[in-house]
Amino acid sequence: MDPAKFSRKLWSARKQLILMLAPLLLLPLLFIVPPKEGKCLYVVLLMAVYWCTEALPLAVTAMLPVCLFPTMGILPSKKVCPQYFLETNFLFLSGLVMASAIEEWGLHRRIALKVLKIVGVKPAWLILGMMITSSFLSMWLSNTATTAMMLPIANAILESLFGNLETLKENCKDKSDPEGDSRVKMHVLPLRIINLSEQKNLEEVRREAEYQMKVWKGFLISIPYAASIGGTATLTGTAPNLILVGQLKSYFPECDLINFGSWFVFAFPLMLLFLILGWIWIAFLYGGLNTRLCISKHDERAAAEAKAKAVIDEDYKKLGPIKFAEGSITFLFIIFAVLLFTRDPKFVTGWSVFFTKGYVSDAVTGVIIISILFFFPSQCPSLRWWFDSRASITPYVPLLSWRKAQESVPWNIILLLGGGFAMAKGCEESGLAVWIGNHLQPLAQVPPAVAVILITAFIACFTEFASNTATIIIFLPVIAELAIRVNVNPLYFMIPATTGCSYAFMLPVSTPPNSIAFASGHLMVKDMVKTGFVMNILGILCVSLAMNTWGLHMFNLHIYPEWARPLNASSATVATHAIVTMNMTG
């Protein structure tokens, strides 16, 4: 057989081969590692391989603990199955349903256009407006939905600024006129017919087109990056944040430091800092930072900017006045955020004190608010309608229907979260986390502040090639045990790892937002690698700064807490319950 043809066949059947070979290749673990820990490690690595290669759908792989843990004697099914719908899953579901209602009535588009009207139309300011809008929406919507919604808006503005993209690409080419004419017509910033007296020479045309292409790329690349950054600011913004909460409750039931309010107070300033630094880098790299940023000039670019502003104004005007449904969603959304934030923010007394201690959680708050969406009317109620015999009888339409929720909520992510919690429970009950921790003792010599940078960098690199949800599920138990082994507050390692999972900027396959932007056809892999490499470094430095400044004081990271007891009773001899002062600088 032709080797080339055979290799193509192998590639086409790679997923089936991985499905069959991975269980066989991992079998030696059952004989090398202690019995129960070895079985759990076998399942964890098998799921890791399937997740990283997507040999099975992610949600299907997430359900493997339901069949493998009981049959291999790791964990009974009555302990495995409840992990798939913990209260953390209900909180995540609440965020997804609220996002569905926002998308249903177009509130997200009104927010986006309003922000763009405020920031102005100069390229750097527009990039900032795109990033602010994307990050804010991503705090509540999914990163993927935010990117998919923002890209068409960006393309409409770009076309009003620079004209047809294909013409722009043609003008970027370095070529000479075969008929000896050194002048060409160019679709410069204003879309109008250019008189011969206004034509530029070929070199000037090419340079201007290259500048415009750079700005175009800057627009497109800023949206998925801002969506990934924005998702870190709230617990419901991205799945890894909720996995952190779920695994904390599993490993450290007495730890109540992380909730919606406390996470927001920590993560929102971090998000803002990273967003500003990211904007400066993207605007610098793609030509948006220049004297035009603050100085108005009356030239062709100014004319194009005026046209872009007109496009934004026109699109916003088409939305018309705020409808009753939009106002209702806005009101409920604000109540949703305020109640989550004020339930138990730690720095002040929250409203949860009015209820039995430990009974009301963020999940309860979320479900209360989203339940209202399914019966609150989308049209303004009127008493006159009841007494007007000539009024039309129209069906009652709530703000959100269950059919719409079913269609728009990614239920596979709910299963993925559950699979992560089930895996964490298995690692805890089997003693695998403790066994791994025993082999991480050499890392105790690394100063904790340096370890934070190394952990964040490693996770950020790993998540470039694997799902961020799968990445944090795999590594969080190991990181928790590592913290116990080196007598460091577990949050000091677990929070940076969780945040670093969202910092996947270098490859189109790293996250769905990156893939959506890349699929537009205007970006190249080298563009994302060049921009994303520096973005990763900036993110790692920002996380390190946050952990060693305001995070240090918010979560008392300088002490080893009482709640950080061993993950398993067998580790009681190596991890103490006493508070041990930790030298943060090594």
Image (cartoon, grey):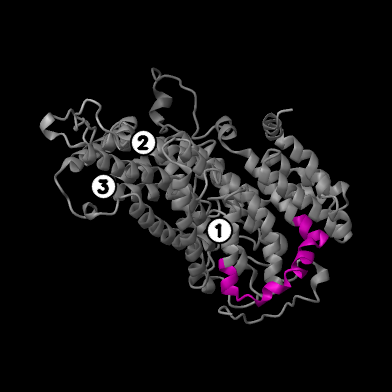
Q: Nearer the viewer, residue 368 or 391?
A: 368
Q: Residue at x 39, y 59 (%)?
A: 277
When the figure is inspected, residue 582 is found, relative to residue 271, above or below; the finding is: below
When the figure is inspected, residue 403 is found, relative to residue 34, above or below; the finding is: above
Q: What kind of element bears circle 2?
A: helix
307 sits left or right of 66 in the view: left
Whole-percent x, y for residue 8 in the image: 67, 32
Say whether disc 1 or disc 3 marks the residue closer to the N-terminus: 3
Q: Which residues are magenta?
A: 425-453
Q: Amino acid at mark 2?
A: Asn
Q: Nearer the viewer, residue 568 or 288?
A: 288
**Cα separation between marks 3 and 2:** 15 Å
Question: Circle 1 sits on which residue?
Answer: 500
Callout 1: 10 Å neighbours few (<14), some, many (20+)? many
Whole-percent x, y for residue 199 in the image: 16, 34
Q: What kind of element bears circle 1?
A: helix
Q: Nearer the viewer, residue 568 or 379?
A: 568
Q: Is residue 288 visible?
A: yes
Question: Circle 3 sits on which residue?
Answer: 122
Question: Circle 2 sits on which residue?
Answer: 155
Going by the picture, which residue comes out furthest to the top?
390
Q: Is residue 563 visible?
A: no
**Cα separation between marks 1 and 3:** 32 Å
